[in-house]
Image (tube, rainbow, N blue to C red):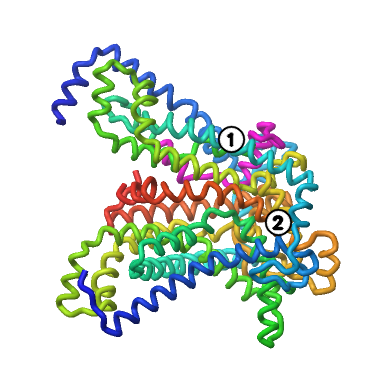
Amino acid sequence: MMTNSNRSSGSLPKKRSNSERLTYNLLMWPGVILLFIFSIVPLFGLVIAFQNYIPAKGIAGSEWVGLDNFILIFSLPDSWRVLGNTLYIAIAKMSIGIVVPLIFAIMLNEVSSKRYKQVVQTVVYMPYFLSWVILGGIFLSMLSIDGVINRIIEMLGEEPVMFMADGKWARAIIILTDCWKNFGYGAIIYLAALTSIDLDLYEAAAIDGASRFRQILHVTVPALVPTVVLVATLNLGGVLNAGFDQIYNMYNPLVYDTIDIIDTFVYRMGLVDMQFSLGTAVGLFKSVVSFVLIVLSYVLAKKFTGYRIF
Amino acid sequence: MVKSNSSGDRMVKIVSYTVVTVLMLSCLLPLIHTLALSLSDKSAAASGMVTLWPVRPSNSAYKAILGDKQFFLSFKNSIVRILLGGALNIFFTVTMAFPLSRSKRLFPQRNIYMWFLIFTMLFSGGIIPMYLLIYRLKLMDSIWALVLPSAVPVYNVILLMNYFRGVPRELDEAARLDGAGPLRTMLQVFVPVSMPCIATITLFSIVGHWNAFFDGAIYINTQAKVPLQTYIQQLVVDMRASSVMSKEELAMLAEISGKSFNAAKVIVTMLPVLLVYPFLQKYFVHGIVLGSVKG
């Protein structure tokens, strides 16, 4: 087939293959121009991290300050706090985000009714498609002092809790609600891996006298290990992404201590307090670290599992 | 499969069914609770009496939405946004995925473009340079600020490119022998056979545009132009304050905003997503996830 196709394309008139190349290039250009404007030009904007940027003066007219912004940022206790919060929340979300979908997928695999399986899948994938504006609204309403959760706590004879005014509670809620939103969707990749297991393996194990629990342990779990390794490595690149949309919609000044993260910090510093240069410096620091981590994660993923995205 | 009836095996079944069911209910109950709130009487909702069933049922919250001019304006803005943004996304995804799916022999510059795309995925300027760019381009307060920056969804381009590469070679050859040029081959061969993938990508990008709120919050200053999620977000700010309020403060707030009213808005806002969701679900497992896992 290979030689065949080579021959047929090879016999094309030269003129036609040139016009074909031109068409491909023309098809690419509109998108390339847009990407240049909205992805590359902002990269040049990053130079304001090394300036004392004043909007009225523009980039050309603002004063260059070298690394002063970075020195200032790393001397602020707030910066270290948000870095710590970001790592804590992101790593907690990732770990739970691997374990819960994994257990869910294994248990769903044990459900024998096909119909029920489908119903469950339909329901648990749904929250993934709802925005944090909506879900933040729902959870904050449920968790407020007059919300349904506190109502239940009161019925059990306990004191109501101001969940979103307490740092530890707020952090736990951020991590748990994120797991709630994403575990169903996160399970898809494991369920896909499960469909490729040869059913004969279970049968053979059963004939050897293995109980269902042992079959899960020795057939299901090993089949999922490569996927778990892949997901874990690819997650590495997101270690500084603790979930801006969610936290922006759910936090408040009382809990900045535990759930203020780099992205929300940059937003307030840059767009609320108009400290463009300082905000950009923090953002640049995050981008550089993230870039290194993403490249590292792809290299590791390729090494361990042979995974390639391109 | 060999049937086994030992008590241990039954235990595995029971535990699995229980855990799976509990997880499913956990996803459903907050939504049912919100629906119940929206259908409850204002004072019942404010006092936290509502759990999963409306207390003193009333449709006054939905009636109130009908009188909320801003809600309708924002709803309309969001519809315009998903139509414009969705159309741009499909256009750029298809027109870029097709040349990139060609071999290096047919399209020698392919790898240069590919590296450019990957570069844009790896590096981003972050929100502040982006904000200043939108400001400089005079796109502030315009719908274009919401659709142009995300008009080229690079990740989707790569997904569709991979899908195009799976199209049987024979179809391509046949079109070539029939004298079809690249544009006709793309529109009449590749696009029709890739409909499941294109449909999935389109639905994802529409849902993405519908759910976006932050760009609307920072780029749009005129309240009448604000998209729906951004408007709901402004209400969430009220709720955010209410999550740390005392009971007395809340009673005052209940007079002016009201939990059932907000719940009704939340329900109406997520309704479009719930409506397209069945179509989305039908395709996304097979159309996207399996394709991307296999690479």
Q: Nearer the viewer, mark 2 or mark 1?
A: 2
Left or right: residue B78 compared with residue B194 = right
Q: Earlier in the sequence, mark 2 or mark 1?
A: 1
Quadrant position of the N terminus of chain B in the picture:
bottom left
The image's mark for residue B105 is none
Q: Which residue is drawn at 15% across and 77% down?
A: A208
* Residue B217: percent from left, percent from top: 69, 47
Q: Closer to the camera, A43 or A207? A: A207
Mark carried by residue B83: 1
Taking the image as shown, residue B253 lies to the left or right of residue B189, namely right
Q: Residue at x 15, y 75 (%)?
A: A207
Q: Name the residue under label 2.
A: B264
Q: Local crowd at mark 2 within 10 Å, few (<14), some, or many (≥20)? A: many
Q: How crowded is mark 1: few (under 14 residues within 10 Å), some or many (20 or more)?
A: some
Element marked by disc 2 = helix
Please determine whether, in this image, residue A145 is positioned above or below residue A124.
below
* First to last magenta residue range: B115-144
Indicate the position of residue A236 as horizontal and vertical percent values.
Answer: 42, 60
Could you tell me the amino acid type at mark 2? Ala
Task: Tell me if residue B130 is in the magenta stretch.
Answer: yes
